[in-house]
Image (cartoon, rainbow, N blue to C red):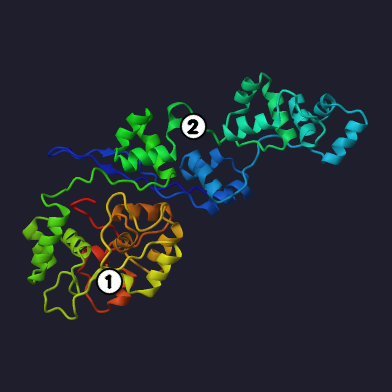
Amino acid sequence: MRMAQEPVHYQADGGGEGRAAAERSVPRWWRGPDPDPVEVGRLYVQENRTETEIAVLLSVSRARVTAVLRDAEIPRRDSRKNCPVDPDTLRGLVRSGATATAVAREHGVSHSTAARWFAEAGLLGSDPKADTHQLVELYVHQRLTTREVAAELGISKGRVIQALAAAGIPRRPRSVRRPRGARAAVTDTALAEVYHRQGMTIAQAATHFGVSEEYVRRRVAEAGLTRRPGTFAPRTTWSPNVLQARAGKLYETGMTMREVGARLGVSTTTVSMVLHAAKVPVRPGGGTRPEAQGPPRTLISDLYADPEIVAALRRHQVRVPDEADWHVTGPFQTYVPLPVPATLLRELYVDIGLSIHHIALLIGLGDMATRNRLIQAGVPLRPSRGRCPWNRRRYPGIEDDDPACNRAGTASDEWGR
């Protein structure tokens, strides 16, 4: 069954008047949701497909298939030939005079494979040139390949493999490779230092390490670091603090969100977001007049007043601050421990029915970062129009006017985070 993802196309800028904008391919950073582990497991275990075949069927890279198998704890198949007889039978053959060469000839394998069978059955003594402590240091701790270990010890690769089997040291899958060259320096600690503490961009970090930008992006994801959405440059003439203060003051005079946005030159969605970020009580319906039915509400207070939400946050070790201490987090701060648990996202979005903006406020990420993590977790997104299930339950009878907290999709953020 083919499960290829639908292609995503972006319109290139600058098409020119009278000319259709040309389609460009999906940016390299866009990976889309990970393959379904159940489907990958079925193809790998039941249909006995190879990782390459699964990657082609699902239109993803082989590395992502490997990662899904690893995360799902699905045992990987070993390409090496196993001994067709049990160890006791093999020992009996040796007692009767069988050699590794004779066993190899009988079963149609190489001499080195038969010698490995002998080592795994404990029929070969330790190699004087391959001490167990040396093997552990070189192969396990330094993560050298068997060829590199052989070069260090001055023996053949086959002898190293036999010595590993005799010492009971499991072989690594071929897919598990240690970074080489400049990539070896891109450790989790080094990446956190230059990307988070020093604030380098992806391009600057790539230049610093001498690797490609694509590799830095992949390592940022693997290390569980918060991906920064761009340069954080404001998209309006207002700074975030000034925009919050001015929008709050205008809104409290009785203007609607649309009128506040028109006065400040920003969208209604941005007005809604900055009002919630500033903890300004919002009138029912978001953009309605003061005479709207019901008292104004503060969104973050309503969210933390829901015991179901608080229980979900605490189960996943998400910090729940007092309302006075809550604030929109900066680019290097979150309320949730990273990486964001997929179970938390699914519980908040699917089970409780919060919007993406609600979740972003609670876990301390931006709307787009939260949306991307939902996609990566394989959570299907609701249509972007209409109120989210949580709003419909908590505020029945209110019109769908609040663009930031009602919509299931991401609201645009015109001043950046």
Q: Percent x, y for residue 364?
A: 32, 57
Q: Percent x, y for residue 120?
A: 76, 36
Residue type pointed to by label 1? Ser
Q: Which mark is residue 8?
A: none
Number of numbered tags placed on the structure image: 2
Q: Which residue is mark 2?
A: 179
Which corner quadrant of the image does residue 269 belong to? bottom left
Which residue is located at x 20 percent, y 69 percent?
401
Say whether residue 106 is left or right of residue 158: right
What is the residue that sits farthest to the right in this orientation? Answer: 96
Q: Which residue is mark 1?
A: 301
Residue 230 vertical placement versus 132 (above, below): below
Mark toward the start of the polypeptide (1 vs 2): 2
Which residue is located at x 45 percent, y 46 percent?
4
Residue 261 vertical placement versus 35 (above, below): below
Residue 405 appears in view: yes
Residue type pointed to by label 2? Pro
